[in-house]
Image (spheres, helix red, strand yellow):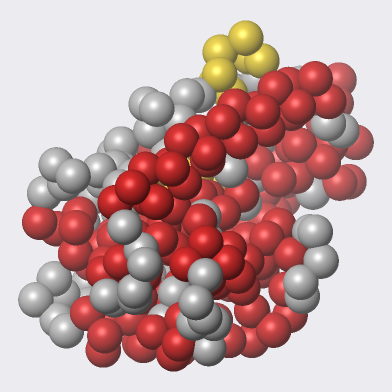
Amino acid sequence: MKSRQEWMRNHLIHQNNQYRFNYIKCIHINDDVINISDKISNLLKLNIIRDNSGTNENSDRTFFNLLRQKISNMGIVIMQSGIVGKNTHRTLKVKDFRAFALIDDIVPFIFINNSDSMRAKIFSLVHELIHILLGKNEILNASIEESNQIDSERWINNVTANVLIPEELVLNYINDVPRDEIRNIASVSHVSELATAIRLKKLGIHGITEKLIDEIKRHEKKLLKINKENSKNSGGDYYNNVSSRVDTHFATAVINSEAEGDITLPRAASMLDVSLTHYDNAIKKL
């Protein structure tokens, strides 16, 4: 990812040596959490993304894709994969890392571990965006439930939860059955039930106990294992997989550079994680 970032940086400077990423260090760790959360929600137009995501079985995927495109359009390259390069035998484990951000004043990068659940990826994407807005690198981000987080990570997770699960949204779904509350709010906010339960507990919602949170944690680990097995068995469409892994703006820059003779075909294929034999069909999909 660092070598791709360096290439993209040089590509953008070559096109316009005045080009800069406009949002670096636009927030600060000492800022009020609620104010920062509102600022980020407005920047992302999150209400519109939520409305456009619908409530069908693909709504989480739609929400993720719309959010990803919005952040990409800000000038951040977002890549994702569940394997190392093209090697399907070298999987990226969620227990090792969920995502990371590479800060840069020209072209910041976010990498998402595609082995994770869709809702967890949504949380990670916003979490890493906040790192970039702070101008603070992070590799190997901790999960929201980790108790040994450093203060800055705790603050970032708190802001992320406030962005994705605002208090006014929570108050619309309060009833007398905590498990139903969690399920409904998680569905509307496109965040895992575990992240939702932790957020509700912090807001002091009645009935959200540590025992219930532990129950949900065990349930989600089982679900992730089942989803991973299903994904491994299905394999998916090769060209759809390529398209989902690579950032649109990065892919366009690579494809145009190869077409203009600025980089070789083998290098372009390598940067897009496709084989030479699949390159032509892959770029049509991209």
Q: Quadrant of residue 88?
A: top right
Which one is nearer the viewer's eye here, 47 or 242? Answer: 47
- Residue 3 vs residue 65: left or right? left
Residue 119 appears at what percent x and percent y?
A: 56, 54
Q: Residue at x 9, y 76 (%)?
A: 30
Q: Quadrant of residue 105?
A: bottom left
Which one is nearer the viewer's eye here, 44 or 186? Answer: 186
Q: Residue at x 53, y 39 (%)?
A: 219
* 48 relative to 244, above or below: below
**In this orientation, does residue 171 appear?**
yes
Residue 222 appears at what percent x and percent y?
A: 56, 31
- Residue 285 vs residue 64: left or right? right
* 14 relative to 237, above or below: below
Q: Residue at x 29, y 51 (%)?
A: 210
Which one is nearer the viewer's eye here, 82 or 230? Answer: 230
- Residue 133 vs residue 231: left or right? left
Q: How many marks?
A: 0
**Where, quadrant-wise, is the N terminus in this rendering?**
top left
In the image, farthest residue toward the top? 89
**In this orientation, does residue 264 appear?**
no
Residue 129 appears at what percent x and percent y?
A: 39, 63
Q: Residue at x 30, y 36 (%)?
A: 140
- Residue 262 vs residue 3: left or right? right
